[in-house]
Image: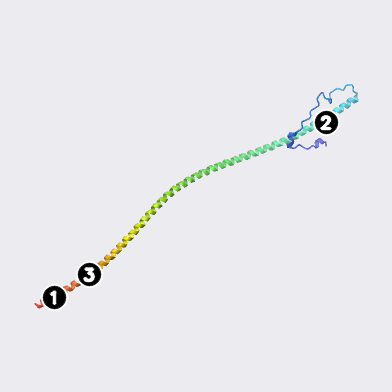
């Protein structure tokens, strides 16, 4: 196996450093194989042709090596291009996925905003109802305080009426007792008058 075939393939990082393919000798150079050697013998002409063929073979090997190097470089570039395409495709898919997720999050945020607005409105209504209820409670407490005062006054009046009724009953009992005593006195006086009238008639 030749040295040219054992040469390792270039790395992608070395692609920019690819050597230029050597050019062919200029027509007017001293190695021009098409130049006619005049005044030389057959042996010299054969050696010249052999040397020229050897040089051409070396140039052809160099060109072949350069071509192989270019093919390896092209293959590496193609591989890199495919990898970049895959990366770009993967990034595009990631971007699309992120955009879809962002759209879902935006919709969710919008829904949460609507829910928050509705709940805020409900809280405002509840606050209004609470204030109205608090006012009603305060009014009810005032009415209860007035009712308690009225009950206290009613109890006082009832107590006074009870005391007056007791006094009237005591006075009535006393008057009944006096009346009974008066009736007994009147009865005794009547009996005394009857006795006196009876004795007077007997004396007549």
CB contact under 8 Å: marks 3 and 1: no
**Cα distance between the residues tagged 2 and 1:** 197 Å
Q: Is residue 23 above or below residue 203?
A: above
| C-alpha separation, residue under disc 3 versus residue under disc 1 | 26 Å
User: Which residue is at a point 60% across and 41% down the rendered structure image?
Assistant: 98
The picture quadrant where one finds residue 177 is bottom left
183 sits left or right of 87 in the view = left
* Residue on which disc 3 sits: 178
The part of the image, by quadrant, that contains residue 144 is: bottom left
Q: Earlier in the sequence, mark 3 or mark 1?
A: 3
Q: Which mark identifies residue 196? A: 1
Residue 8: x and y in percent read 78, 38
- How far is disc 2 from disc 3 in space, using C-alphas? 171 Å
Query: Counting other residues with Cα less than 10 Å from the Cα at mark 3, is it few (<14), some (14-19), or many (20 or more)?
Result: few
Residue at 27%, 67% in the rendered image: 170
Which residue is labeled 2 in the image? 58
Disc 1 is placed on an element classified as helix
User: Mark 2 or mark 3: which comes first in sequence?
Assistant: 2
Question: Which corner quadrant holds the N terminus?
Answer: top right
Q: Residues within 10 Å of mark 1 (few under 14, many from 20)?
A: few
Work out whether 85 lies above or below 198: above
User: Which is nearer the N-term, disc 2 or disc 1?
Assistant: 2
């Amino acid at each position: 196996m030749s040295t040219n075939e054992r040469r390792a393939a270039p790395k992608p990082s070395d692609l920019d450093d690819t050597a230029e393919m050597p050019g062919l000798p200029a027509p007017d150079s001293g190695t021009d194989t098409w130049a006619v050697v005049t005044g030389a013998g057959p042996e010299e002409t054969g050696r010249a042709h052999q040397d020229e063929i050897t040089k051409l073979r070396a140039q052809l090997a160099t060109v072949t090596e350069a071509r192989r190097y270019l093919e390896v470089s092209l293959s590496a570039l193609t591989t890199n291009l495919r990898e970049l395409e895959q990366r770009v495709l993967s990034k595009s898919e990631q971007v699309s996925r992120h955009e879809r997720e962002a759209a879902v999050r935006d919709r969710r945020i919008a829904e949460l905003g609507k829910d928050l607005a509705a709940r805020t409105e409900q809280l405002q209504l509840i606050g209004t109802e609470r204030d109205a209820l608090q006012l009603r409670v305060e009014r009810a407490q005032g009415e209860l305080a007035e009712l308690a005062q009225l009950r206290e006054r009613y109890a006082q009046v009832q107590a006074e009426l009870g005391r007056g009724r007791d006094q009237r009953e005591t006075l009535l009992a006393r008057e009944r007792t006096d009346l009974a005593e008066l009736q007994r006195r009147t009865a005794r006086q009547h009996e005394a008058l009857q006795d006196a009238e009876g004795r007077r008639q007997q004396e007549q």
